[in-house]
Image (tube, helix red, strand yellow):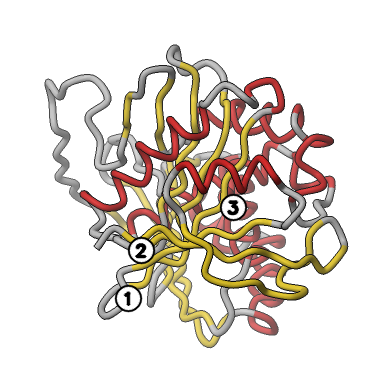
Amino acid sequence: MTTPSQPSMPCYAVILSSSVMLENMTYRIMIDKLIDLAKEQAGFIAAECSLGETDLLLTYWQDRDTAEHWLNNTILRRTLSLAEQFWFDSYHLRLVEVVESHSFQQMNLPDHSSRFPRIQTARGVLKILDESEVDLLKAYVIEEKEFLAPWEPLRTDAYYSTALCKLRIREMRRDFLEDQGVAFCFLSSDERRMLGYANYSNLVRGVSQSCHLGYSLRESEQGKGLMHEFLSAGNEYLRKECRIDRIQANYMPRNARSAAVLEKLNFVKEGYAKHYLKINGQWEDHVLTALVMR
């Protein structure tokens, strides 16, 4: 979600509220493209977006003429027509005048103060990236493309683009806020280089209190004990702060390094799944393990 700067009053807003039948990656890319398009228009001030039971996309404009120009933008209208066919159950598009605004911003906060976790370890930092750090994620996926390919699903060229890396970061932050997952990026101590990634996904509450773990590490950082260091800190955060006390992780039988990492972290083998996940274009068997901290 983007937060608008304080414009002079009055200003105008165009509000798109929608109820969505199908929310997928393509839908989220569409929303991002609409925001990018609005930014290119004369009179644009800022945009806010919130996706939930009712999705909201608000754009703010300097005057009524520029707001009406956006309201009747040909590409916007075509996009809404497409959305009627594929995503929207219903939507409303409104033009309103903003005559007054009240704001609050916390001041004098300590460094790194955030609702998003930041964990310092002996040799690095675990954090959920901000959009301003998109270049760290992009460099990681591009530079480790060949090394990670045998252990990951097939990727399209778009996966390595700035746009999709930004979208992934937005999803990481959204999942955290909605208690769906915790996607830690492992950064060097100076936070200038991404070393690895750990995604605690599919958080299940209630009688389960469990999640799944997927992870990767740069080829140049293999064999240094970094994955053990980072995952130890991540697992402890999930246990203490998220009250998750069962973490499930699976690996392909030929991935000896992954097996060793999990064993050292006290994950226990619980089963063997045939043709479990499609990795690099092939259905692969996986060893099923879990860390139980109850």
Q: Residue at x 46, y 54 (%)?
A: 267
Circles 1 and 3, Cβ within 8 Å, touching? The answer is no
Residue 60 showing in the rendered view? no
Q: Position of residue 1 (x, y in %)?
A: 40, 49
Q: Position of residue 152 (x, y in %)?
A: 74, 52
What number is the disc on residue 32? 3
Q: Residue at x 36, y 72 (%)?
A: 204
Depth check, front residue: 186 or 270: 270
* Chain-order first, disc 1 or disc 2: 1
Q: Position of residue 130 (x, y in %)?
A: 45, 35
Q: Is residue 158 left or right of residue 198?
A: right
Instruction: Identify the image quadrant of residue 71.
Output: bottom right
**Is the residue marked by circle 1 packed among few (<14), some (14-19), or many (20+) residues within 10 Å?**
few
**Is the residue marked by circle 2 packed among few (<14), some (14-19), or many (20+) residues within 10 Å?**
many
Q: Amino acid at mark 2?
A: Arg
What number is the disc on residue 208? 1
Query: In the structure shown, which secondary structural element does the residue marked by tag 3 occupy?
Result: helix
What number is the disc on residue 255? none
* Quarter of the rendering occupied by the C terminus: bottom left
Q: Amino acid at mark 1?
A: Ser
Circles 1 and 2, Cβ within 8 Å, touching? The answer is yes
Q: Is residue 15 above or below residue 134?
A: below
**Is the residue marked by circle 3 packed among few (<14), some (14-19), or many (20+) residues within 10 Å?**
some
Q: Residue at x 16, y 41 (%)?
A: 103
* Chain-order first, disc 2 or disc 3: 3
Instruction: Give the alpha-carbon distance from disc 1 to disc 3, as whole Å.
Output: 35 Å
Q: Is residue 110 left or right of residue 30?
A: left
Residue tagged 2: 246
